[in-house]
Structures are given as C-alpha cells and as structure tokens.
Image: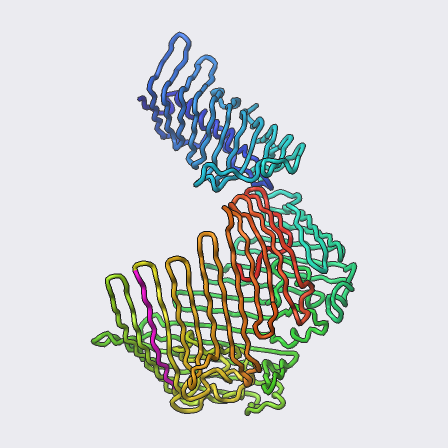
C-alpha cells in the first residue's frame, strides 16, 4: 500500500484523474431528449488541493528500464471522492499514456458508476478511449457502448451506443426496459454545446419503431432552446381527431413562449399561444386561443357551441411572493362565449365553473389575512348565459387573530369577515312546494366581527371542562330586490345590524381501557350553549350558509351553519359518545353517536329561510335526529365506513353514506352508496339513492385495468361510466381511457371521450386527450 499527495505522485495523479476523466468522457454521453442529457463533466474533475490519495494493490512495480509504473491485482485508488477499481493500472512516463485493464469500475462522488474492460488516456486527458463501456447513473438510466473516445479536447464520441432507462432494475436486475435507443455514433461537441445522433433507432419490445438518420440537439449546458416539442393528440366526439405540434421559443433567460397549433378534423384550425415571464419573486402567464369552426352544426341545437363560428379566449395567471408571509396573484379568463374553453378542453381552463379571482394573502404565527375578488365563469352551452348572470360577483376579506398572551388563563381569538356581493339576475327556482331564493338581484355588504375566549380545565378524576364566551356583531348594507312570494319576513330596510352573545361549556370524560392486545378510548361529551334568539332569522340575504347537512362531523360545532350569513341562536345542548379502538394485529375501530337538543329561544333551523337551509335537516325540532359515524380498518387492507342520520321517532334512515374500500397488492376497489330521504321543504321531492364504484386490477407486473361507474338507483340509469388500462414501470407509462357522461342539461359538447398517454422517462410525454378517469386520483 502506498500513500501520498498530488504533487509527489505524478503517475498516481494521472491514474486517478484519468479515471475521473474517463467518467467525464462517458457520463455525458447518455442519449438525450429535449435538452435532458445527463451531465457531461469537465475533463479534469474538481478536486480539492489538499485531497489525499490512497492506493491499494497486490503488487506495485517500478521498471526503471522502461520507465513504467505498474500496479497489479485488485488495484484500488481513492482520491477526492472518486473510487477506481481495476485488475491492473500501468503508466508509461515516456509516452505520457495511462492504461487500465480488467473489470474497471469508477464511482463518481455523485454516485454514478462507470464500467469498462480497457482504458487508454494521454496524460493531458485531451485524447483517450475506453472499450466495452457501461454507465449506470444515479437517476437509474443506463448507457452501453462498444467504445468511447475523446478527440481534440472538445469532442466525445461513443461508438455503437445503447441508451435506456431502467428504474425497476434497482430492485430487479433481470428486468428489461420496454424501450431503448441505439445509435451508431453519438458525438458531443463541447464548443458548440450540441449532441449529434447518427443512424439512431428507437426500439420497443426489441423491434425498431422509428429511424433517425441524423439528429442534433443541445447538451445539458443548454437549459432552454427554441424548437419543436413532442406532438400531442386528442379525440372528441364532435371535434374529431386533433393533432397539436407545439413550438417553444426561448425568448430570454426570464421569458419564453409556446405556440400550439392544432388541426381538428371536424372543426378546423385551433391556434393557442402561451407566454411566460418570470420575475425574482413571481411568475406571469398569458394565454390566448381561437378557432373559426368549420362545422358548428355538429353541435346540439340552441347551444352556444353551435351559434358562433369564430370563438376564442384570453387568460392570465400571476403568482407573486412579496415576502415569506405575504403573497398576491390572479387567475382570470375572458372568452367569446360561455363554453369555448370547456368544449375545446383547454388545459387548466375546462372546469364546469372557472373561478376568476385576484387575491392577497398573509400568514403569521398567530394570525391570517385573506382578501379576494371573485367572478364565476359558468361554462355551459346556454346561449343566454343565464346561470352565469345569476352568479354573484363577490369580494371577501377574512382575518383571524389569536392573542399571543393568555387572557384570564385562556385563549382569545378575533375573527373578521367582510363580504360584498353584486348580482345581475335573481337566482330563484321552485321545486315542488319549495321556493328557493339562492341569490337576490342587486347588491349587499356585510361586516362581521367575533371575539371568542375559551379555557380548558382538568379537574380531579380526569374530567375535562372547557368554558367559552363569544360576542359577535354584524353590520349589513342592503340594496337587493325583495324576494317576491317569500313566506318569511324579509327586511326591506337599507341597512341592518345584529348581535349574538354566547356562553358555553363543554365537558369530556376520557376513559381509557386496555387489554393484553388492544387499547380502547371512550369519551362521553356534553356541550351547552346559552344565547338569545337569532336577529332577523331568515330576513337577510343568505349567500354563504346555503349548504347544510347535519351529521356526526358537525354535531359538536357551536354554530352548525356553514357560513356567516346565518347565526345559530337559542340555547342548545349537544351530547354524544366518541370511541376509538386499536388492536395489536392492526385492526382499528372508530365511532361517534349523538343527538342535539334545542332548550330555549327561537330554533334557527325551524325558521323561514331564503333557501330553506334548516328545513328537513333533523335539527328543526326540539330533539334532533340521531347522527352516527362508524368505521373499521382491517390489517388486510379492507375498510368500511358509514355515517347515518336516523329519525328521532322511528329510527328510519333519513340520510346515509356507506363506503367499502379494499387496497391490496394487485386489486383495489371502492364502492360508495348514498341514500337521501325526500326533503320536500328543502327541495328534494323524492328519495334519492346512488352507487359510485371504482376498481383497478393489476393482472401482471406493471399492467393494470381499471374502471368506474355511477348508477342512479332511483331512475335505474347510468350517470357516468368509464374504463381503461395502463402499463407503468416508472420508465414507460402507457394508458388509454374511455369515458361516457350522460348530460341531461346539454352543458357539454362531447358526451364521450377517449384519452391516451405514452411517456418515456427522460425522453418525453405524448398525450391524446384526458387520461384521468372519474373516481381515480
């Protein structure tokens, strides 16, 4: 064994640096795609000046006659993070050549591994070659070549090279990737920063599917370069086959753009452009798209899709970080009609309702601030845009502050909300005997502020007591048209104020029971909230407290309404039991059961409301319906969860949601059954029941088939169904999906669609339509 430093062991320096140079020769030679080439290091590695060299070998020979230094037998060189192993290393001081032979392996500091049978380099590293080259990178790609050579200090040449990605090989060395690229020559030019493939073939399943005589592309040092991207494909029922050929423009280090022309066989030429500008603290995106439809008559009659020939949109999105606590941004879209982006399935803009908004948010250690402005773009096929005109144009401000220091030993919080709403058209409909005023024509502003104090005590014996006090005030500006035919008493003044004072107490008594192989926690809970009746109950606009479902999740909420526009008033008690059980074998149990009681004052859930929010909710009587939730998780991957609301008199099911899920190594499925009893006062005149199911089966390694459906049990009809299959080994992803939606409102232009995706890791991703299936994340 011998040790030294770089200044005194010239040949050892040559040996090690030659090995590192060999890695430099080949590490960047993996075949690239779209400027995704692996790193091609400098010829001489970046080694620290004080790096120490360690050499181990069975035999070290100095031949003074031939001026050669030879290390034989299990040669190991460790230097500056590089590790070189070979059967023999020989350095010729006369010619300045270094030669290593036999099972050569070089490990870089980055973790890349380079293998070869023979290496020969000049001592200035400007020229050299290695035979039987093989590289394994840390990102699990592989490269093999008959030989690698460096010429004139600037060109790296690989002869008869094969490149592939093989993530599964990390755990299964016998796995063979579905694809590989073969080229007679791969030339990387360090001066022009390009990589040229000569006589390259792309092969799948061992068969060539594409031949490229010559292809030149930028190397890893070029981060962005103008040029064509992978083509995209899509197919939709009324649009036909679409072929998109995106072209990327690298305008500046902080600016780029993509032009995406699409030919649709049934509708013509769709042009789309996207411009991106990056700042030191954010990003701005501008998009535009347009088409002059060839065949509008292929769409349904009396729809906006059919009415217009030229259609288009412009959109912008911005995200800026003012500092670590404050951000602002926007997401806006303007289109020629109300359904263009959805019909042509523009990425990020095709949702049923596109929420245009601008925002300013701040988050501190004990406070939060959120200011937003909304415009809801309803994308349907109605040429009159009635639903969009019924949507509110809203501005909201939310602020929450928790006082950092305890107040009277407890926590004091302040919640503030400001909401301003303007609506062009009243949102009113009748269903059976129920009239619902979801939105009134005109404008309104509400300022809400609430203080809450609470403190927890644990008394001897383990009883947990939490007293609380709350005070809330609201100030309303009212400039809305009064609802005609409303059964309640609507306040027609220009303004209104209301207050609410609450005193409450929660008592919990956790009981822990343990056995030899399980733990059980029983927690009886009782709450009481004393407060006056709600001011103007049902007499003020209700914009944000319309969606109301009474179940186990909100049994113990102080105010069970979903928003600020309604306040729960009157004295109320909530009682129930919470249970959690865990077993050593992995079995887990959980449940909640309870009931709520109205004790005094006016029951807010029994009063008139513009949308009948409390009607048939189970809380409109002095004693509420029973609510419960239970779940079980088995160690084999099977889980069952169910929640229900049972009638307080006869225990009939008023609402239930039950889901069964199984997660296995090869099979996973989930079935959800929902049943809602008729709620005529709320607008549901008949019982509703539905089954949703989704399943996936891996019938072979990396291959799977999946599907989902939604079935309406009341009407005995399929609402939605889809099926697909995929291959995914992380290097190659292939999937194809068919989905059909039965849209009774004619708000979609396409009743069914087919999507496909083909992705090769490190090369690119080709998509045809949308490959996400409803029911799968």
Secondary structure, magenta segment, majority class: strand
Q: Residue furthest left?
A: 460
Q: Residue 18, position in %: x, y?
A: 45, 24
Quarter assignment of residue 466: bottom left
Q: Residue furthest front?
A: 716
Q: Residue furthest top?
A: 65
Instruction: Relative to 717, say whether 451 is above or below.
Output: below
Q: Identify the colour scheme used.
A: rainbow
Q: Residue 674, position in %: x, y?
A: 51, 72
Q: Which residues are magenta?
A: 572-583
**Which quadrant does the N terminus fall into?**
top left
Q: Residue 8, position in %: x, y?
A: 36, 21
Q: Is residue 382 left or right of residue 30?
A: right
Visible residue check, residue 494: yes
- The one nearer the camera, 130 or 322, is 130
Query: Which residue lies at the image location 56% right of the left edge and 50% below the top edge?
Result: 726
Q: Is residue 575 magenta?
A: yes
Query: Which residue lies at the image location 71% right of the left edge and 61% below the top edge?
Result: 312
Query: Which residue lies at the image location 65% right of the left edge and 58% below the top edge?
Result: 753
Q: Is residue 367 magenta?
A: no
Q: Is residue 4 left or right of residue 129?
A: left
Visible residue check, residue 777: no
Q: Residue 509, position in %: x, y?
A: 27, 75
Quarter assignment of residue 10: top left
Instruction: Relative to 25, say whether 731 is above or below.
Output: below
Instruction: Relative to 475, say whether 171 is above or below.
Output: above
Quarter assignment of residue 490: bottom right
Q: Is residue 607 left or right of residue 86?
A: right
């Amino acid at each position: 064994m011998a040790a030294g430093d770089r200044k005194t062991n010239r040949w050892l320096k040559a040996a090690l640096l030659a090995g590192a140079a060999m890695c430099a020769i080949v590490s960047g030679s993996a075949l690239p795609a779209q400027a995704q080439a692996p790193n091609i290091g400098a010829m001489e590695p970046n080694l620290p000046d004080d790096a120490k060299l360690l050499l181990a070998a069975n035999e070290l020979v100095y031949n003074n006659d031939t001026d050669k230094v030879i290390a034989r037998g299990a040669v190991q060189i460790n230097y500056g993070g590089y590790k070189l192993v070979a059967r023999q290393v020989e350095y010729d001081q006369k010619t300045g050549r270094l030669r290593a032979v036999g099972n050569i392996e070089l490990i870089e500091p980055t973790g890349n591994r380079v293998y070869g049978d023979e290496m020969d380099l000049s001592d200035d590293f400007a020229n050299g070659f290695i035979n039987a080259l093989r590289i394994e990178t840390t990102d699990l790609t592989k490269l093999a070549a008959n030989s690698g050579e460096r010429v004139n200090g600037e060109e790296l040449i690989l002869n008869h090279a094969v490149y592939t990605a093989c993530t599964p090989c990390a755990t299964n060395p016998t796995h063979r990737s579905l694809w590989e690229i073969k080229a007679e020559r791969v030339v990387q030019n360090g001066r022009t920063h390009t990589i040229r493939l000569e006589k390259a073939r792309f092969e799948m399943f061992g068969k060539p599917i594409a031949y490229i005589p010559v292809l030149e592309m930028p190397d890893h040092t070029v981060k962005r370069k103008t040029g064509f991207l992978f083509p995209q494909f899509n197919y939709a029922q009324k649009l036909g086959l679409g072929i998109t050929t995106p072209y990327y423009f690298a305008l500046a280090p902080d600016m780029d753009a993509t032009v995406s022309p699409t030919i649709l066989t049934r509708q013509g030429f769709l042009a789309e452009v996207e411009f991106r500008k990056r700042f030191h603290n954010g990003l701005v995106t501008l998009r535009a798209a347009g088409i002059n439809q060839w065949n509008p008559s292929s769409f349904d009659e009396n729809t906006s899709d059919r009415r217009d020939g030229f259609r288009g949109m412009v959109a912008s999105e911005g995200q800026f970080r003012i500092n670590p606590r404050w951000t602002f941004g926007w997401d806006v879209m303007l289109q020629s009609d109300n359904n263009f982006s959805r019909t042509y399935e523009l990425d990020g803009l095709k949702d049923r309702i596109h929420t245009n908004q601008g925002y300013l948010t701040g988050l501190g250690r004990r406070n939060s601030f959120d200011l937003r402005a909304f415009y809801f773009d309803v994308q349907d096929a109605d040429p009159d845009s009635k639903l969009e005109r019924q949507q509110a144009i809203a501005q909201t401000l939310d602020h929450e502050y928790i006082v950092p220091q305890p107040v009277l030993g407890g926590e004091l919080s302040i919640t503030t909300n400001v909401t301003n709403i303007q609506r062009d058209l009243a949102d009113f409909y009748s269903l059976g005997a129920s009239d619902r005023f979801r939105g009134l024509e005109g404008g309104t502003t509400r300022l809400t502020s609430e203080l809450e104090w609470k403190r927890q005590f644990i008394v001897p014996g383990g009883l947990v007591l939490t007293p609380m006090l709350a005070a809330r005030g609201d100030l309303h500006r009212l400039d809305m048209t009064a609802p005609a035919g409303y059964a309640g008493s609507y306040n027609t003044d220009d303004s209104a104020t209301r207050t609410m004072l609450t005193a409450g107490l929660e008592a919990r008594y956790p009981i822990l029971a343990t056995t030899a192989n399980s733990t059980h926690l029983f927690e009886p809970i009782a709450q009481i909230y004393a407060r006056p009746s709600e001011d103007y109950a049902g007499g003020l606009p209700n914009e944000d407290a319309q969606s109301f479902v009474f179940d186990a999740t909100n049994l113990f909420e102080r105010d069970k309404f979903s928003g600020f526009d309604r306040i729960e008033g009157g004295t109320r008690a909530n009682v129930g039991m919470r249970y959690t059980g865990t077993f050593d074998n992995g079995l887990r149990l959980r449940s909640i059961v309870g009931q709520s009681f109205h004790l005094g004052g006016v029951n807010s859930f029994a009063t008139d409301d513009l949308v009948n929010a409390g009607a048939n909710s189970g809380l409109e009587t002095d004693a509420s319906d029973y609510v419960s939730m239970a779940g079980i998780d088995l160690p084999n991957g099977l889980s069952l969860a169910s929640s229900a609301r049972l009638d307080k008199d006869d225990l009939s099911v008023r609402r239930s949601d039950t889901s069964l899920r199984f997660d296995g190594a090869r099979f996973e499925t989930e079935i959800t059954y929902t049943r809602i009893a008729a709620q005529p006062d709320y607008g549901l005149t008949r019982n509703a029941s539905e089954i949703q199911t989704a399943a996936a089966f891996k019938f072979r390694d990396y291959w799977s088939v999946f599907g989902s459906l939604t079935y309406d049990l009341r009407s005995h009809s399929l609402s939605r169904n889809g099926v697909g299959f995929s291959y995914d080994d992380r290097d190659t992803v292939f999937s194809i999906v068919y989905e059909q939606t039965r849209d009774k409102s004619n708000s979609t232009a396409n009743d069914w669609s087919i999507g496909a995706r083909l992705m090769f890791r490190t090369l690119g991703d080709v998509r045809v339509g949308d490959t996400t299936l409803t029911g799968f994340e």
